[in-house]
Image (cartoon, rainbow, N blue to C red):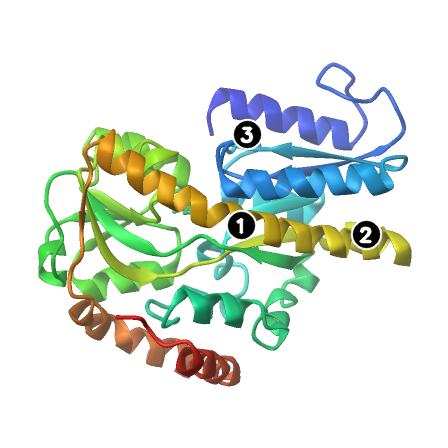
Amino acid sequence: MKRAKWIALICVVMLSVGTLSGCGSAEDDRRVIRIGHNQSTSHPTHIGLTAFADYINENLGDKYKVEVYPSELLGSQTEMVQLTQTGAIDFVVASNAIMETFSSNYQIFNLPYLFASSEAYHAAMDDPNVTDSIFLTTEQAGFIAVTWLDAGSRSFYTVNKPINSPSDLKGLKIRVQQSPTNVEMMRLLGGTATPMGFGDVYTALQSQIIDGAENNELALTDNGHGDVCKYYSYDMHQMVPDIVLANYDFLESLDEDERAVFDEGFQIINTVQREAWEEAVEAAKDKAQNEQGVEFLYPDTAPFQEAVMPLHESVLSENPELQPIYDLIQEYNAMYPSGE
Ligand code: GCU
């Protein structure tokens, strides 16, 4: 973790045990609620969280004060999940990818080509019968998920070699999120997985420690990856949601009326973020193409899909309790099939 982040983190931890006055707001007796995430302040996630902060501050502002910490200021996603677990902070936005190391049930939403279309993805993730049992699995560990956020679809992008088929990945080191499912996905596709935290990817690309990465279009612009990577191949191998996690004891400490306001607030994050998402993706594509000189490629996705399908079988056979959820997702896929 970088020095500035350590300082911010130490401030937060010390504030939470009430030992410090120099880092911020001990001026009133409102309970400060801290939310950490790893995106910029113009990212849809930050826009959604800001709407949440405004809503809580407007409705429960005599008692609570919500503060949103962007840009990995409080640490990497994994570190922030741990801080949420212990209650050092109250909320975090974490990619579903890293959640499988906390609860194996989260593996299901990391499966490549799980959702047939973005409509199927949205409808399935909005259905509590799909999400609830998974979102609550970490209660014993000290946190639960309160809503999900759209993180688009993930595709490969590379510094200097266009990816038109899985065979083009051979011999390439590709950054993936820190998840065993993602590592296995890369193995099945023939590339070499290099797991690392999001904040380290730009430098790794720039110094060519890795040959490419995989993410949605915003990583090109918001995180500058498009300054280094000139080919973005729409193989669309995953739609991995982001998950808003809350410290469980904090949620339990709310009375019924307060909890109702927070529940409404969680819905606001989801709606506002999703509305901002589509526009942000269009703007990112435009900027990447016209200002950063990124070439967008549209490979046949069938060979990618074929290569990774064994992962569905292995995850389901290791986690049979996921089968009914998987089947329900297939119903949404039938309802909203791929437009291709
Ligand atoms: C997306 C996602 C983040 C995640 C990142 C990554 O940006 O929204 O939550 O951390 O991908 O690839 O690590």
The numbered mark at residue 317 is none
Look at discs 3 and 2 and give the one toward the viewer: 2
Between marks 3 and 2, how big is the CA–CA gap?
27 Å
| Secondary-structure class at tag 2 | helix
Q: Amino acid at mark 1?
A: Glu
Residue 230 appears at what percent x and percent y? 17, 38
Residue 139 appears at what percent x and percent y? 69, 63
Q: Earlier in the sequence, mark 1 or mark 3?
A: 3
| Secondary-structure class at tag 3 | loop
Q: Please name whichever residue, 325 or 217, is drawn nearer the observer in this view of the structure.
A: 217
Which residue in the structure is indicated by mark 3?
Answer: 73
* Residue in the image at 26% along x and 46% along y: 213
Q: Earlier in the sequence, mark 3 or mark 2?
A: 3
29 lies left or right of 18: right
Q: Amino acid at mark 3?
A: Leu
Residue 27 appears at what percent x and percent y? 85, 19
Crowding at mark 1 (Cα within 10 Å: few <14, some 14-19, many 20+) = few
Is there CB contact under 8 Å for labels 1 and 3?
no
Q: Please name whichever residue, 119 or 254, is drawn nearer the observer in this view of the structure.
A: 119
Can residue 88 be seen from the camera position used here?
A: no
Q: Amino acid at mark 2?
A: Val
Image: 185 above or below 288? below
Which residue in the structure is indicated by mark 1?
Answer: 275
The numbered mark at residue 261 is 2
Image: 247 above or below 338? above
Between marks 1 and 3, how big is the CA–CA gap?
25 Å
Can residue 158 be seen from the camera position used here?
A: yes
Between marks 2 and 1, how big is the CA–CA gap?
21 Å
